[in-house]
Image (spheres, rainbow, N blue to C red):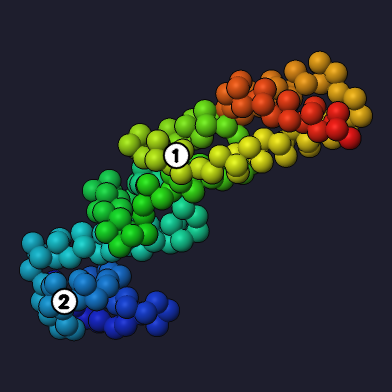
Amino acid sequence: MKIVSLVPDQKIQGRWLLTLEDGTTLKLTDREMVDFSLYQGLDVPAPALEQLRDAADAARCRRRAANILSARPLSRRELEKRLVEKGEAPEHAALACDELERLGYLDDAQYAKTLAQYYVNRGYGPRKVRDELYRRGVPREFWDEALADLDDQGQQDALDRFVAARLGRIQAPDRKDLKRVADALSRRGHAWSDISAALERYTHHLEED
């Protein structure tokens, strides 16, 4: 099938619009232009045309993956799933993720650290962090490193802020008040030893005042 038009996309730099004689338009990148040696008037044999269509689909998937990842960080599994849900072929989604990993834009190890720090800053404990890493598809091999990189003082400060926020308006918190806070912290994934220490710091502060 003959290429009747081949022009640069005026909206997106590095993208080309290829129109075939049947009216079909393919959106290509410089990579496909070079790989297939394309030019206007070229008569593309049927087997090569199928490869070109597949390459155009793969290029679209790469663009979509980059756009999704630019909006917010994701794990590889999340990104692959998002691409397939939007209609991309699983093999194209996997290849797009491979390329983003190679370029350093998709990094499960760094994502695990970012996610762990985010939840710790919001007052959640290691158990909650592990639950989130699992839910978001981060490979287990990155969990321990992400948790080990957390600053102990930062975790303690986050706990203290949570306790103060829950008890700060109560002049003389009793055992029920302390238990409610302890239960809330437990649900947030904190170990009892850390909860107990945080409550002890808070009550000690009250006694000093």
Residue type, numbered disc 2: Val
Q: Quadrant of residue 57?
A: bottom left
- Residue 172 is drawn in which quadrant? top right
Which of labels 1 and 2 is toward the front?
1
User: Residue at horizontal 13%, vertical 73%?
Assistant: 36
> What element does badge 2 sit on?
helix
Q: Where does residue 132 sit, x and y in percent of width and height?
A: 49, 35
Residue 189, numbered circle = none
Relative to 28, 187 lies left or right? right
Q: Relative to 193, say whether 103 is above or below.
A: below
User: Quick one: label 1 or label 2, which is nearer the N terminus?
Assistant: 2
Q: In the orientation shown, which residue stands out farthest toward the front?
A: 208
Mark 1 residue type: Ala
Q: Position of residue 162 (x, y in %)?
A: 72, 36
Q: Nearer the viewer, residue 111 or 199?
A: 199
Image disc number at residue 148: 1
